[in-house]
Image (cartoon, coloured by chain):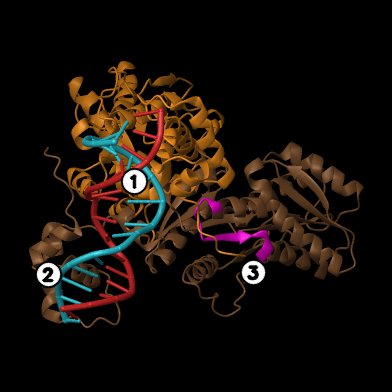
Chain colours: A orange, B brown, C cyan, D red
Amino acid sequence: MTRRKRPTSTDVARAAGVSQTTVSFVLNNRPGQSIPEETRQRVLEAARRLDYRPHASARTLARGRSNIVLLAVPDLPMGSGITRFVEGLAGALAQHGLTLVTHLAGGHGRPLTDVCADIGASAVIGLEAFDEATVHELHKAGADVVVPSTRQGSSMGPIGRFQAQHLIDRGHRRIGYAMPMHSGLVPMAEERLHGVGEACAAAGLPAPVVCSTDLESDTAARAVARWTEQGVTGVCAFNDETAIAVLAGIRERGLVVPTDMAVIGVDDIPTAGLADPPLTTISFDLDAVVHRRAEVVVARLTGREPSGEATEFRPLLRQRRST
Amino acid sequence: MTRRKRPTSTDVARAAGVSQTTVSFVLNNRPGQSIPEETRQRVLEAARRLDYRPHASARTLARGRSNIVLLAVPDLPMGSGITRFVEGLAGALAQHGLTLVTHLAGGHGRPLTDVCADIGASAVIGLEAFDEATVHELHKAGADVVVPSTRQGSSMGPIGRFQAQHLIDRGHRRIGYAMPMHSGLVPMAEERLHGVGEACAAAGLPAPVVCSTDLESDTAARAVARWTEQGVTGVCAFNDETAIAVLAGIRERGLVVPTDMAVIGVDDIPTAGLADPPLTTISFDLDAVVHRRAEVVVARLTGREPSGEATEFRPLLRQRRST
DNA sequence: CTGAAAGCGCTAACAA
DNA sequence: TTGTTAGCGCTTTCAG
């Protein structure tokens, strides 16, 4: 296999009998330039014939900005939910000419900031908010926009708020929060918990009683015991899986749902309806979230402010039996 | 927030009172250059003070090669297994100064080749072999090395071969293969199936009877019925999840494992031991696979041939009750 | 041992 | 409407 060099835009120019600038204009559809259709076609044709591909690094260097967006995924069990999110986001960004790649934290890979710098990302998206320090680091690593950052408010808070509100509306005065054990999930959980806390405070209730649990009934039972001691009657679980564990824990303690203790999850995963008893949970339109997120990034990247003040989440209660 | 420009290597040079060339030499530890420790320190110090970060695109442009590796993940349910693989690979590559990012196929994101070109990846790694056409495309998109490609042999074949061999050794003369329904998994499954076919052929047995099944007992039962008709007594499942479904299917048909039909999975997932009956499966040292894969990429990228002829997989039988 | 200078491939003023 | 010309930030020969 001969290692022929990749054709450059100069090659295309030569092949089309125009200047390299013209090639650039045509290929970028540069607005405000009235290039005769005839020339355009000649250039396009030449580019196609040569299998020309613009050299990303060169373009980035010249433009001063890449069209790469990096998604930072924490060290968590990647379920189908996150997969759908990633793919949706990639699609939404692609419509704006942006390319999304994913970085999985954890393991012995490079730290996020290095990855950001190495691939020349011009935006970094996280699942949960980045703290100020990280945002700063990322900016220094070349990212122009970083979301969500703590300064613009958590994106997970509304979920917790919504969960807690449901419980409060049903008369619960002492709320518990079921925190996942898995460390990669904790930051996200903490954001949701924060929302729960806000709802409690707003209702004049004491702060939620936080207990960690993994996905086994005995640790969940332990958490349930603690809640019982503290007089908790309604618990918000980080997500449906955690909620299902809590359900099991409640059963194990010989209590009944939702009379003795009510539970509400998040995500509306398929098996939520198969739980015993069927789990009440909240869900939201993933596509809407994704598009909103993409829009924010695109807007920032192009200098505009995000259009409208559309709320990111439209929580949807999926009431079943456990609350 | 003031949008100060990022410091360049020229800034560092100025701050250190040396030429930009020297900075480059020091920062890259350029071999064969005996730079006095005193100067080195001055440069390093200046770089640190300015928070200098080399500009990836510029470096890539000048060097003609990036240090980015792209992992192409098909549209599949990302389980914990794949996550570990990704993180392991990222770690192994990082040791060689390479940065790994992941692209999830599926959805409406850009095609792999575009992503490859956009991020300027110099290597693309897939889970299953790329066909010739794709390899070619990727090369044109700027990737210097693409693995695994069909020309260098499938990486999944040995797994299937090993599964089948176990069954054959136990006296089974008619082998079935349980193919997953999920389309993203099919290419990988086909590679493993190929290995199964080879083992059968080598033993003078007819080709395996292929049935698809998803993760529910009724479709699995249908598959089991087909196998029974065809006289199949041992089935290789694509992975443990599929195998567990098959187990359920066998039960549903009123047959008993492994007397009437034996099953062997792949992956040794935690729940494999909890299945009824406990599932025999094969596993392999993920770290070894990962390191091997990384080594191949690094070797190719640096022009060397991969060291040694170490086999990629060291399959390990985890025998339990279902075969 | 260090620096000057020529690009890498592309974009974008500025001319023509 | 198109071409000329300077860089973008870094690497790397080749002189000094």
Q: Height in image: A299 above or below B157?
A: above
Q: Is residue B181 left or right of residue B81?
A: right
Q: Which residues are magenta?
A: B140-153
Image quarter of residue B152: bottom right
- Per the image, label 1 sits on a secondary structure element best described as helix
Q: Which mark identifies residue B18?
A: 2
Nearer mark to the viewer, of 3 and 1 = 1
| Residue A313, horizontal then vertical, whole percent | 35, 23
Magenta stretch encompasses residue B145: yes
Marks 2 and 3 sit apart, C-alpha to C-alpha, by 56 Å
- Per the image, label 3 sits on a secondary structure element best described as strand
- Per the image, label 2 sits on a secondary structure element best described as loop
Q: Nearer the viewer, residue A312 or B165?
A: A312
Chain of the residue displaying label 1: A
- For disc 3, the neighbor class at 10 Å (few under 14, some 14 to 19, many from 20) is some
Q: Nearer the viewer, residue B41 or A220?
A: B41
- For disc 1, the neighbor class at 10 Å (few under 14, some 14 to 19, many from 20) is many
Q: Residue at x 41, y 61 (%)?
A: B65
Q: Amino acid at mark 3?
A: Pro
In the picture of the structure, the residue carrying the numbered disc 3 is B315
Marks 1 and 2 sit apart, C-alpha to C-alpha, by 28 Å
Magenta stretch encompasses residue A43: no
- For disc 2, the neighbor class at 10 Å (few under 14, some 14 to 19, many from 20) is some
